[in-house]
Image (spheres, rainbow, N blue to C red):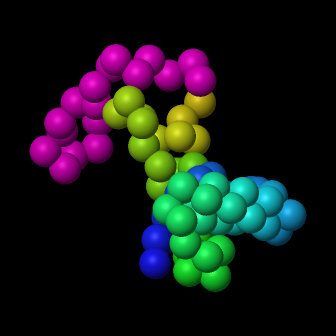
């Protein structure tokens, strides 16, 4: 019983989720040699503000320098 988890950004509509689930199910069923009914696909929609890459949240404006690490202010506002 293969289980596939997909995390992607929120905003994809039901048709795109259905296409993703259908394609992944068919592919895994073929490769694993199991019936499609045995394949489970879990799709999680994640807010870009809850997704980090390269030290920044995905909703960070593109003009922010990803190499500039935030300064530790000891809990104080800068």
The residue at 17%/36% (across/down) is 72
Q: Main secondary structure of the magenta part?
A: loop
**Of 44 and 18, which appears nearest the observer?**
18
Q: Is residue 26 magenta?
A: no
Residue 53 position in % (x across, y down):
42, 36
The residue at 78%/67% (across/down) is 18
- Is residue 24 in view from this perspective? no
Residue positioned most to the bottom: 37
Residue 73 position in % (x across, y down):
18, 39
Numbered range of the magenta stretch: 62-78
Residue positioned most to the front: 33
**Of 23 and 60, which appears nearest the observer?**
23
Q: Is residue 55 left or right of residue 29?
A: left
Residue 55 position in % (x across, y down):
35, 33
**Of 74 and 50, which appears nearest the observer?**
50
Q: Is residue 64 magenta?
A: yes
- Is residue 15 in view from this perspective? yes
Q: Is residue 62 above or below residue 45?
A: above
């Amino acid at each position: 019983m293969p289980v596939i988890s997909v995390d992607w950004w929120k905003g994809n509509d039901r048709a795109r989720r259905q296409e993703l689930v259908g394609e992944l199910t068919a592919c895994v069923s073929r490769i694993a040699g199991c019936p499609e009914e045995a394949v489970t696909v879990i799709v999680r929609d994640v807010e870009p503000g809850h997704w980090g890459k390269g030290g920044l949240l995905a909703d960070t404006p593109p003009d922010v320098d990803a190499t500039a690490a935030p300064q530790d202010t000891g809990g104080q506002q800068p």
